Amino acid sequence: MAATFRYKGFDIPVDLAHMTGGGEDTFDHISKEHMQQADDHIGISPDNSIVEIGCGIGRDAIPLAERLSSKGQYLGIDVVKPMIDWCQRAITAKHPNFRFVHFDVAEKWYNPNGSVTLQQCKIPVPDASVDAIILHSVFTHMMKQDVAHYLSEFARILKPNGKVLATFFIVNGDILQNQGPKSYITFYHPLGGGCYVHELEKPTHAVAYEENAIAALVASANLRMARPPIWGIWSGRRPQPGAGQDAVILELAG
Ligand SMILES: C[S@@+](CC[C@H](N)C(=O)[O-])C[C@H]1O[C@@H](n2cnc3c(N)ncnc32)[C@H](O)[C@@H]1O
């Protein structure tokens, strides 16, 4: 039997939690930080329809289940099948309006034996039906063509007033020049077009973008930044305490 820890009435598998970048010690703290960011920047109402990409093992779904009414809808998508299986068994069983779908995308870091490309995957919700889309620490593991695919899907599924909250590592000349052995994470490998990776062998281990590269991707999808980026503490642009990664808030360009 796999080791678990108890969180808000759920037994969370430790091995899967570690794959999402944390364990029992940080789970509640990060979960609260995510909810605070959602409240501050996108606003969640009980009857909302929410999509989360890279839902992991419910760090956001579990607190959202306390906040959505039975009219609210949540869809979580991930490329790791055991995470989706666990979320279905544990969360959907208690909250039938919380749905979890596996995208079997070939992804070197998270799902090396996947059978499809992301471009073959469509988010299974109708056009213009979603109030909020959340991605925590997901575009930080993704190459440009996959970010572009998700952004174009977001433009299709967002309601006219809908919002996206997505975290990134956003770099500029200063950050790139001043990184070193003591940095939170380094991005020494440019792949071109404002994209940098931490490790060439496993590029999706950690990916950073220049702000104008993100802006170009966003504009190509007919979305726009609803406000300037919210800096995280990772690059030193924001003093501690605060969220680790940078975040952007997107809306339909109109
Ligand atoms: C660092 S974890 C964060 C998980 C979750 N958002 C959280 O904060 O607990 C990144 C997640 O993104 C998922 N992921 C990676 N590539 C993905 C893709 N193309 N589509 C959906 N999920 C993806 C991984 O499987 C993993 O669960």
Image: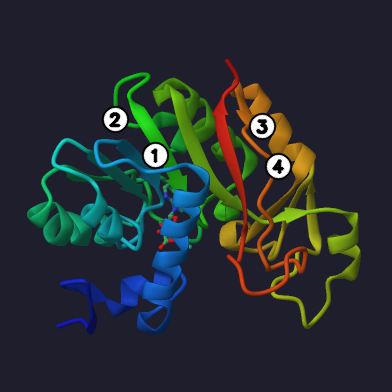
N-terminal label among 3 and 1: 1
Mark 4: few, some, or many residues within 10 Å (few <14, many ≥20)?
few
Disc 2 is placed on an element classified as: loop
- Write down the residue under mark 1: 116
Quadrant, the N terminus? bottom left
For image coordinates 83% across by 71% down, the residue present is: 179
- Label 2 CB sits under 8 Å from any ligand 1 atom: no
Nearer to us: label 2 or label 4: 4
Separation of marks 2 and 3 at Cα, in angstroms: 22 Å
- How far across and down, in percent of the image, does residue 225 sit? 65, 34
* Residue 138 to residue 200: above or below: above
Picture quadrant where residue 233 is located: bottom right
User: Pointer 2: what residue?
Assistant: 124
Q: Would you say 227 lies left or right of 50 here?
A: right
The answer to whether mark 1 is within 8 Å of ligand 1 is no
* Residue designated by label 3: 217
Rendered location of residue 51, percent (x, y): 35, 40
Badge 2 or badge 3: first in the primary sequence: 2
- Mark 2–mark 1 Cα distance, whole angstroms, equals 16 Å
Question: What residue sits right under mark 4 in the picture?
Answer: 228
Within-10-Å neighbours for mark 2: few <14, some 14–19, many 20+: few
Q: CA distance from mark 3 to mark 1?
A: 23 Å
How far apart are labels 2 and 4 at the CA level? 30 Å
Q: Nearer the viewer, mark 2 or mark 1?
A: 2
In this view, 13 is above or below 200? below
